Structures are given as structure tokens and as C-alpha cells.
Image: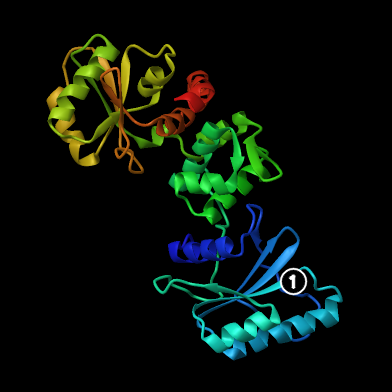
Amino acid sequence: MDNPENQALIEIIRTTLNLSDSAVVIKEPISKKAWSPIEVDLVIEDNAIKYFIEIKSKVRVDSIARLVLLKELLKKQEKDISNISLVIASKIIPPIVEEIANQLGIKLVPIPHNIGIATHQYDYFPNKIKITSEKSWKIITRLLKEKMTSIRQLSLLEKVSYGWAYATIQSLISQGIVTKKGNYVTFSDINKLLNGIGWERPFENLFVGEINIEYDDAFKAAQNLTYMLKNKRIKFAFTSYTAGGLYTGYAIRYDTVYLYLERKEIDFFIKTFKAERQGIKVRIYAPDRDIFYDVREKESVQVVPPGQTLLDLAGLGYSGRDITKALVDKYASI
């Protein structure tokens, strides 16, 4: 589960210990040879160094004793323990504990008092990442814009936890969509990404209805609807081919516009604008996430942001592939 408090705590530990973007949480036993294993709350591996971490509300001397005993056990089993670092993360660290920890080379990580902790329950990386989830999609579109950057930068730029950013990129790497060179990642197969989106989030699953309106030109219809719906303070935004055409200059269908509306406004829209004669078609969609917070205006038409446009176009599958690729090519400059 994506627990915000757990993610915040992991991020504090990662920053304090100055871990790299390649740091990962280890879930297997500390030592398969251990006859009486001492468990810790968290194990992180970073550049061949393993950090054994105890997490406490208030740290006591017995926590230090446990880690020292663990180190002695591992020394007997592993012989070389130069790659092991002992860490205690705690909200309250008494002076005597700090003094002993410093003498023994145990690193201390102060935890802010308002951060929740639940030891032995750190599922830092989700088991299954949906690339079209809101947070993962932020990471993906940011990488499209930056072209090559670190996971850490993706996390910071999009204000998504490092753990989620890492899990998203690892999922893409495992599918052959992204490659990693040192601490930097870049796309290697955009077609696989687009195919995955079309399968995972088909755009037409959000379709709720279609009406004809009294316009003969799709672009003019979108402009006039923008003017009228804004005056009524209705939440709306054009997407799919309509938005994609405006972002890319790519030729779009001239007989249809594609419109997101809040569900509560759909009946009003249909009753108000439905025409008897055949005219421009309005295909209406109900959003599966908040798509109205960052709407843009292009040539007097209110549209969803580029990232949402790309998600929706890719969700059309092969039928929208040409304009989707055109948007991918221009994405970094939009």
C-alpha cells in the first residue's frame, strides 16, 4: 500500500544517509545462515552497502545492544562485514544513546515528531505499478519532457515520493521501456509505453454519451462551447483529438469534438446543447481523476494539459497512434 507517512519516513532516512537514486529496500532475510536471526525494521541496499535500520519512537540503549549483537553474529557468519552499516531512526534520541552510538559507529537519523511510524510494516515499493496511475504518469511525462534525468530529479520535480518514482521507473525498465545509464534514465521504446497505456487504460471506457450540436465546424464549436461553459462556471476541458490537434498542429477530425465534463453537469449539457439536426458531434467523457486543476487555453479552446492529452490519445490504441506519436515528439517543447 502507498502509505504517505511511510514514504515520508523513508525519504527522511534516504536524505539523511545521503543514499543514491539506486538505493533499494531489501525484503529477504538478513542472513540465510542465521540460526537465531535478529530482525530489524528496514534494510536498504545502496551501492553494495547494506543499511540495517531500527525505527523507534524513543530509542533506548537496548536498541543499540540489539544492533551490536546482530553485527557480531554477521561477523561470525560473513567474515567480511565492511559493507554493513547500522542505523537507528528515532523521534527522541537521549544524550546517552547519542554518545554510545557515536562511539560504536552507529548512525542516527532524527525523525520529526509529526511523522507516523509503524515498524515492520514498510512496504516502500508497491508490488504492482500501474503506469497510468496519477503519480506514475507524472513521473513518465516528466521523463518525456526531460528526456534524460535521475530518478531523484523526477521525484523532486513532480513532488512524488522517491519510492514511487523508483518503483515506476523499475517497472518500466523491467518491461524494456526505459534504460538506466549510471544514475540517469531515458526512454528506449516509446511504442511499448503507448501499447501498455492502450491496454491498461482504454480511453473509451470513460465514454458516457454523444450528442449532435448546431455547428458545422469542430474548431468553432469548441471555441463557442468554451465561452459558454466558462460563463456558466462549469468544469470542463476538451481532450483527445481536439486537444491533441491544438497542441501539435496535427490535422484532426472535423466532425467531432471530445469533451470532459463533471458527471453532475452532463445532463445539463445534453439538455442545453442537443440539436435535432445532424451537426458536429460532441463525445462526452467522465474523468477518472482530477483533470480540471491545470486546464489550458489554446486558441480560445479550454483543453486538458499535455500530459492528460497524451494519456487519453494513447488510450485510443492504434486508431490514435499517429497523433499520439506527434504529441510525443513535441512533448518536451510544449
Question: Left or right: where does residue 225 sit relative to residue 296?
Answer: left
- Residue placed most toward the observer, 61 or 203: 61
> Quick check: can you spot residue 181?
yes
Quick one: which residue is furthest to the top in this view? Answer: 216
Question: Which residue is depicted at the point 41% across and 74% down?
Answer: 113
Question: Left or right: where does residue 273 sit relative to residue 222?
Answer: left
Question: Looking at the picture, which amino acid does disc 1 mark?
Answer: Ile
Q: Residues within 10 Å of mark 1 (few under 14, many from 20)?
A: some
Question: Which residue is depicted at the point 29% across and 14% down?
Answer: 219
- Residue placed most toward the observer, 120 or 196: 120
Q: Position of residue 60 (x, y in %)?
A: 55, 88
Q: Position of residue 236 (x, y in %)?
A: 25, 32
- Secondary structure, mark 1, is strand
Which residue position holds label 1? Answer: 84
Question: Which residue is depicted at the point 40% across and 36% down?
Answer: 205
- Residue placed most toward the observer, 64 or 271: 64
What color scheme is it? rainbow
Name which quarter of the figure residue 312 lies in.
top left
> Quick check: can you spot residue 34?
no
**How many marks do you count on the picture?**
1
Query: On the rendered image, what quadrant is the C terminus found in?
Result: top left
